[in-house]
Image: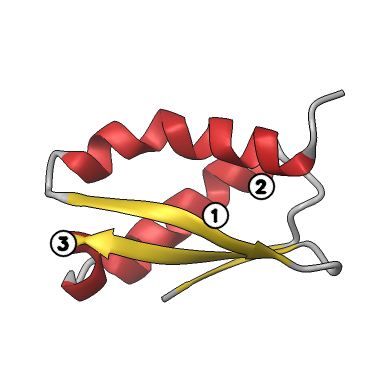
Amino acid sequence: MDSVLTRVEAALDSLRPYLATDGGNVRVAEITDAGVLKLEWEGACGACPMSPMTRAGLEDSVRKAVPEITAVEAR
């Protein structure tokens, strides 16, 4: 079975082209023992006023693909 990180990256990879269209990206900073995925915005996503909604969409997609993830935080 693939590792949690591998499956998280695969889920994010399916969404990265949409972030890239606006000049942004996201990277995994940490996955805590409690299953919290901590992301860091890159590029245009860092200052985007829509980032809270984008984070919610990322969380939905990642949690469906990787049930071990309990929450997603982004900064």
SS class of the residue under badge 2? helix
State yes or no: discs 2 and 1 in contact (Cβ < 8 Å).
Answer: yes
Residue 63: mark in rendering:
2
Q: Which of the 4 image quadrants contains residue 17?
A: top left
Q: Name above or below for residue 52 compared with residue 1.
A: below
The structure residue drawn at horizontal position 78% and vertical position 44%, both measured from the top left corner, is: 67
The structure residue drawn at horizontal position 79% and vertical position 62%, both measured from the top left corner, is: 35
Quadrant position of the C terminus in the picture:
bottom left
State yes or no: discs 3 and 1 in contact (Cβ < 8 Å).
Answer: no
Residue 44: mark in rendering:
3
Q: Is residue 58 left or right of residue 10?
A: left
Q: Amino acid at mark 2?
A: Arg
SS class of the residue under badge 3? helix
SS class of the residue under badge 1? helix
Quadrant position of the N terminus in the picture:
top right
Say which label, 3 or 1, has the lower sequence index.
3
User: Rounded to the nearest whole Å, what is the CA distance between mark 3 and mark 1?
Assistant: 19 Å
Q: Position of residue 10 (x, y in %)?
A: 56, 30
Q: Position of residue 71 (x, y in %)?
A: 67, 65
Check disc 1 and report the residue beneath it: 59
Residue 25: mark in rendering:
none
